Structure formats: C-alpha cells, structure tokens
Amino acid sequence: MKNLLVNKKYFGVRKRLPLSREELFACATLLKVRLPINRNPRFSTPVYSGKNQPMNGILNIDKPAGITSFDVVRKIRYLTGVKKVGHSGTLDPFATGVLLVFVGRETTKHISKFSNLDKEYYAKVKFGEKTDTADLTGKVIKRKPIPELSISQIESVCQNFIGKIQQIPPMYSAIKKDGIRLYKLARKGNTIEREPRRVEIKELELLEYNKPFLKFSSVVSKGTYIRTLAEDIAEKLGTIGHLVELRRMGIGKFSVENALNFNKLTTKIVQENIEKDLFLF
C-alpha cells in the first residue's frame, strides 16, 4: 500500500505513515478526497481474485446517522474493488439501521425483489412543531399547542392506521414528477400536488409517550413514509409533529441485531459476512 502524507491539521503530525486500506478510506473521507475505484490496483483489490470467482452477495449494514445510503455503497465499492454495487430501501442521512447492500452484477439484478419486503422501524416523534422536511433536519415552519393526551387515546389513533391506507408522499422525497425528483423542487421552495399512494401498515405499536415525545414501532409495506405516518398521527391527535429519530430494525429476515457496524468494516469482515445464497431470503 502506498504511503500517504497525513496533514498535521487532522492528526497532529506531518510525516509519511504506512496505512491500511481501511485507514486510507477513513483519511480520504475526513479530507474529502475521492479515491479511485477499479482503476488502480494499489487502491482497489477485489476480495475474490480470479475471473472465475466474481464477488456476488448481500451485506446487511447498520447505517449510522450523518451519512447517505450512497456513502455506504461507496465504501463497499472501495473495500471490495467491485464497481457494480447497489442498495435497496434508501435511508435518509439522519436515519440509522438496516441497509441492504448488493455486491456484484448477478446480485444487483435481484434488488427489486428485496425492495418489496416488509420493513420494521422504530420512530420518535416530537409533537407541537412541524418542519418543512417532516424531520429534525428541516426548519420549523409551524407551532401548535399539544392537547392533553392519554395513552388510550394515542393507542386508539394508532390502531386506526393499521391496514391498507392512502398516503401522500412528502415533498422531500426521491419520487419523480415530470422527470424531476420532488426534493429538488422542494429545495427551490416549490410545492406541487402529489397523488396518494396505497400502502399497508401491518403493525403499529405505541412504545412510550412523554410529552412532547412519542415513540412507536411499525411494520410497513414498500413505499411507506414513516415521516408522513408520524405527521398523520400527530394530526389525528389534534396537533402537529415531526420525526426526531428513525431506525430501521429490519427488512424481511434481515435484522439490525445481525447487521455489520459500518465504522468497523474491513475487507476481511466483508468477505466473511457476505450472504451469497439469495434463495434463502
């Protein structure tokens, strides 16, 4: 591995240090330097060598807050040297939890199959404030008093959402309108009419209510926006709200308990934990 000149601004020392592949990636992320993928063998060596052993499989990654889903893909590309890498079920930067990453040309062909699996979430809502993004990353655009609510009232409202419902997607979403993603229009201050979509809330359980915060868990179908669900629950309770925490606990049989820690990923860990048999899921 080629030595890297490390800036003392970040590490308190300026000298040449031999860095591992994982350390080099961490430094590049910190310094905001993009590393080449599949161009220089010094920086990009596939886990499986040999033309007859292409790397294919699924990785269950626990995405941390503060990075995009594509940042996870980018790291897996770097660690494996495989260019054809994708994911199913985008998580917003503030959200954490299960993100399925598909490695290799043969595996990425099946992404749509896994996108249709049910997803389980843990969510925390703050009542009394509405943001333009429906989560904590947006700016507060409205405030409203919170009525006195009993646990039985909240549970009753939650029960009414269980089943197949019509849900209007948020403006800050990746859905396209006339070829343009809605979030790009939203960032320009534009709001357009969105068609309701049919989704299914299979489970919705109140975990805790400590004014102004509500915690719930849910199992939902493909296409369900938990941000919108949180806003709708708040509205039915006579107030407004936005998400302050969202964690995906599972997708189908993939659980967060068995997910790989993103910050501890290495080439060896990827090689040892990649799921190769798609038909098991």
Image (spheres, rainbow, N blue to C red):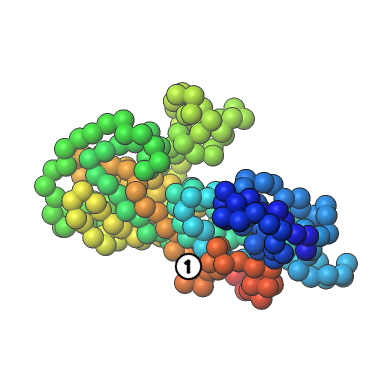
Which residue in the protein does label 1 denote?
A: 256
Q: Bin the neighbour count of mark 1 within 10 Å (Cα to Cα): few under 14, some 14-19, many 20 and up.
A: many
- Quadrant that contains the C terminus: bottom right
Give coordinates of residue 27: x percent, y percent.
63, 55
Asked whether 146 or 110 is in front, the reply is: 146
Query: Within the image, what quadrant is residue 189 found in?
Result: top left
Query: Within the image, what quadrant is residue 180 found in?
Result: top right
Circle 1: element type: helix
Asked whether 81 or 10 is in front, the reply is: 10
> Which residue is depicted at the point 24% across and 44% down?
127
Asked whether, in this view, residue 223 is left or right of residue 70, the answer is: left
> Which residue is depicted at the point 13% across and 43% down?
147
Asked whether, in this view, residue 237 is left or right of residue 7, the answer is: left
Asked whether 29 or 254 is in front, the reply is: 29
Asked whether 106 or 84 is in front, the reply is: 84
> Which residue is depicted at the point 27% across and 47% down?
126
Give coordinates of residue 268: x percent, y percent.
68, 73
- Rendered position, 68 above or below 131: below
Give coordinates of residue 247: x percent, y percent.
42, 58
> Which residue is depicted at the point 76% across and 69% down?
47
